[in-house]
């Protein structure tokens, strides 16, 4: 006998992964240059040279220490550097004792959901959303309440949201810049959200936490503001990762930050640490605690994503696709050219264009395009997108 839930998770088909695997098999048949894989969000630019140099230096200079266990919550010197960086950049009032280092944003979120959940609790998520949220929330024993997408600008449908907040609401999750829409929540959106949460927390007599999942925080295009969420809503918990900003997804490193002023903050931090312990996430990889904390004010050379976005959006619009302008991350979320996004994605696949149906992100009638690829791949793919559009005329 095994856990049916875990067996289900271990065998369930992921459309994105299937597309990605299909792309590799197809590339072996027809040549990699003839397959246009926009299925997955693997950063296409290398980590900064300083990251590799720092890793090499630490391995050379500290061969005995660098692989040793650290404190469960992460090495004190690494947490101090992260705190100083957050204070420099966002005036965050961060202290090292409120940072818990983890294996990426996925683990940060799991620590938060597991740390916060009491029986009957619910977390509200806005579509379109990163599909793993449901796995993480349900894994913590809570219920995910999904708010349908506001498809004109991919901000928030506040009418639907207000109706969904109940005394069971333990937290609300935001992800901005967003996977899959690429949109950044405006200050006005966050302020309106904060006002509702403040009012409802007062009405129900318990804090409703705002969990800000921000692995794409730095991947944002000219002139777009990404507000520091704890300055807008007091009871915010920040989940961060270096997977995207430093192009280090395989190194598995990120953190949870519980701001000093958050309600019951000491308890929340202790519960996050307890969840990290119970999930086996203690002591994030020690080499990369050091490397990322020494390089945390840098980013990979992310300007290519903006170039890709501009090229893609203007070309697709010219062909008649409807696309909301992305502000960052490296995703586009255009409308599919027929209501059935799975059928549309299949039709694209027949042209060797691999794009993920939006239904899995909670937004039927859309597809996700990951444009973290070489610009040349996009240029060569555009005639196929044209052929796809023409096939609907
Ligand atoms: N949150 C979002 C919105 C993501 O897109 C991803 C990864 O793609 C994650 C969390 C998980 O990131 P990590 O690699 O840091 O676990």
Image (cartoon, rainbow, N blue to C red):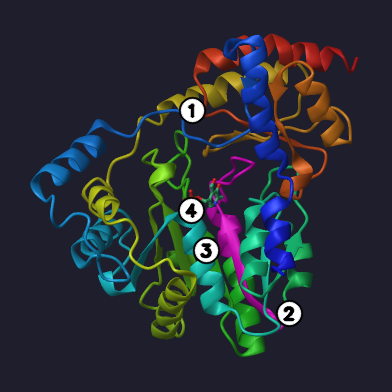
**Residue drawn at x 80%, y 16% as measured from the top left:** 388
Earlier-in-chain disc, 3 versus 1: 3
Find out whether residue 168 is within the magenta segment: yes
Check disc 4 and report its element: helix, strand or loop: loop
For disc 4, the marked residue is 214
For disc 2, the marked residue is 166
Tell me if the residue at label 3 has its CB under 8 Å from ligand 1.
yes
Q: CA distance from mark 2 to mark 4?
A: 25 Å
Q: Is residue 35 visible?
A: no
Q: Is residue 310 visible?
A: yes
Q: Which mark is residue 46?
A: none
* Quarter in which the N terminus is drawn: bottom right
Earlier-in-chain disc, 3 versus 2: 3
Earlier-in-chain disc, 1 versus 4: 4
Q: Is residue 180 above or below residue 165?
A: above
Check disc 1 and report its element: helix, strand or loop: helix
Q: Which residues are magenta?
A: 166-192
Q: Nearer the viewer, residue 125 or 194?
A: 125
Residue 248 lies, in percent from the top left, at 39, 41
Residue 103 lies, in percent from the top left, at 42, 57
For disc 3, the marked residue is 109
With 172 as the anchor, is 263 left or right in this view? Answer: left
Residue 22 lies, in percent from the top left, at 69, 27
For disc 1, the marked residue is 306
Q: Quadrant of residue 391?
A: top right
């Amino acid at each position: 006998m095994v856990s049916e839930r875990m067996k289900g998770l271990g065998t369930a088909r992921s459309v994105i992964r299937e597309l990605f695997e299909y792309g590799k098999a197809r590339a072996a048949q027809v040549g990699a240059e003839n397959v246009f894989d926009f299925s997955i969000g693997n950063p296409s630019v290398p980590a900064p040279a300083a990251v590799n140099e720092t890793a090499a230096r630490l391995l050379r200079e500290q061969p005995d220490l660098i692989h040793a266990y650290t404190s469960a919550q992460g090495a004190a010197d690494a947490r101090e550097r992260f705190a100083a960086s957050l204070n420099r950049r966002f005036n965050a009032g961060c202290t090292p004792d409120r940072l818990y280092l983890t294996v990426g944003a996925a683990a940060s979120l799991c620590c938060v959901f597991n740390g916060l959940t009491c029986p009957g609790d619910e977390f509200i998520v806005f579509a379109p959303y990163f599909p793993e949220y449901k796995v993480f929330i349900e894994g913590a024993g809570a219920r995910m309440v999904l708010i349908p997408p506001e498809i004109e600008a991919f901000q928030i449908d506040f009418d639907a949201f207000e109706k969904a907040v109940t005394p069971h609401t333990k937290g609300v999750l935001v992800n901005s810049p967003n996977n899959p829409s690429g949109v950044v929540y405006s200050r006005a959106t966050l302020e309106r959200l904060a006002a509702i949460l403040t009012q409802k927390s007062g009405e129900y007599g318990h804090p409703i936490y705002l969990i800000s999942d921000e692995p794409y925080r730095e991947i944002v295009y000219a002139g777009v503001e990404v507000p520091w969420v704890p300055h807008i809503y007091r009871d915010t918990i920040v989940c961060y990762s270096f997977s995207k900003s430093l192009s280090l997804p395989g190194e598995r490193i990120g953190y949870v930050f519980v701001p000093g002023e958050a309600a019951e903050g000491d308890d929340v931090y202790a519960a996050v640490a307890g969840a990290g312990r119970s999930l086996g996430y203690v002591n994030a990889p020690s080499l990369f605690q050091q490397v990322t904390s020494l390089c945390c004010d840098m980013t990979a050379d992310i300007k290519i994503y903006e170039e890709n976005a501009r090229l893609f959006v203007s070309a697709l619009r010219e062909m008649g696709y409807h696309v909301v302008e992305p502000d960052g991350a490296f995703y586009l979320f255009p409308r599919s050219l027929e209501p059935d996004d799975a059928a549309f994605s299949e039709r694209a696949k027949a042209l060797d264009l691999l794009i993920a149906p939006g239904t899995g992100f909670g937004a039927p009638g859309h597809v996700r395009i990951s444009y973290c690829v070489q610009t040349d791949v996009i240029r060569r793919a555009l005639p196929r997108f044209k052929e796809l559009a023409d096939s609907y005329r």
